[in-house]
Image (tube, coloured by chain):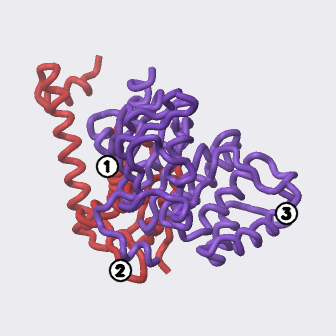
Chain colours: A red, B purple
Amino acid sequence: MPPIRTWTMDDFRLDPSRPLYEQFVEQIRAMIAKGELEPGTRLPSVRETAASLRVNPTTVMKTYQELERLSLIVTYRGQGTFVTEEEEAIRRSRKELAVAAVRQMEETAKSIGLTLEQLWALAREKE
Amino acid sequence: MRNEETRNLGTPAIRFKNVEVKVKRKRVLADVSFEIEAGCLAGLLGPNGAGKSTLMRLMTGLMVPDRGDVELFGRPADPSRLGEVSFLPDRGQLPAHLTAGEWLGFAARLYPDWDGAREAELAEKLGVERSKRIGSLSRGEEARLQLLTCLSRQAPLIILDEPFTGVDLLSRERIASAVVGDMADGRRTFLIATHDIREMEQLFDRIVLIGDGTIRGSYEVDELRSSGRSVESCYREVFA
């Protein structure tokens, strides 16, 4: 039997002034990257998720569609939705997250007139 | 069932066109126009006295506008269409001397579209105790029983007027869960009037803002959020 995950409101932090499905995608993606959601884990249905998180079912549908597009989850008709067991898809997603994080750090570095390497060195410099 | 199949795709579930209502020469609604897409969960938001309840009564056909048109699924609202509308009125009262179970048995015989299987499923989710006398229920318990009555019907349009007023937190959560669980298959359209935004803002896909009897805005909630606004901030902008 694969592990089964149920969601509670405490699993997510939501900002009401950003599209909710984007935030669910980001946070579930991070759970998969971290291994907190293991490959093969069964996810609750759209209806169950909407009811337990008290969000609109459309939001959950969009979230699952986007995660499917990223190949991070798969839905088998009549069986349910599962976290992918393809290590490659998870690795690729983790890499995308890393690239995005570095890009953001580069922006921060640039905003104070440094390259990423200089930023790193400066931050680690001993007083 | 038949209603859903014969309904044209793209026809809004609710449509108000230039609706005006006067009560004793006072204008309660002025030039109200808006549409609600079928299959969505819409919030009707506005302060007390804004005209929310009047607007909902017009949808049941129990009240007729002085001017303009009210349409449900492309046809005029009318009392003969009550079978298509499940309405939870604000401060509605159930007979106090009955038990919850007796009331549900009565409702099952009263409404031709009653769905017994759904009743059983929802009674458990909502934690309704059949043996309790209605007169002894707390406000939250009574609100859950009222919602159960509304959702156990198969009507394609559900209208809830202030389902959270005076209801405790846990009951509010159960009500919200039941509503979203119920609409997940996209067959029903919900319109919920509330001034309790925080509890509900994650649920809506559309909000219609009403103040002083006029429509002050109608927004798709995802579009609002994409522009960095929340339901609450939008409400404040309009009504503060």
Query: Which quadrant of the rendered structure holds the C terminus of chain A?
Result: top left
* Local crowd size for mark 1, using a 10 Å CA cut-off: few (<14), some (14–19), many (≥20): some
Residue under the point 28% across and 21% down: A126
Residue drawn at (22%, 48%), measured in percent from left and top? A98
Left or right: residue B175 compared with residue A39: right
Element type where label 1 sits in the image: helix
Q: What amino acid does circle 1 point to?
A: Glu
Q: Nearer the viewer, residue A89 or B222?
A: B222
User: Is label 3 in a helix, a strand or a loop?
Assistant: loop
In x, y percent, where is residue B33?
A: 35, 42
Res. A76 mark:
2
Kind of residue at disc 3: Thr
Residue at the top extreme? A127
Amino acid type indicated by mark 2: Tyr
Q: Which residue is mark 1?
A: A22
Q: CA distance from mark 1 to mark 2?
A: 23 Å
Q: Secondary structure at mark 2?
A: strand
In this figure, which residue is indicated by the disc labeled 3?
B99
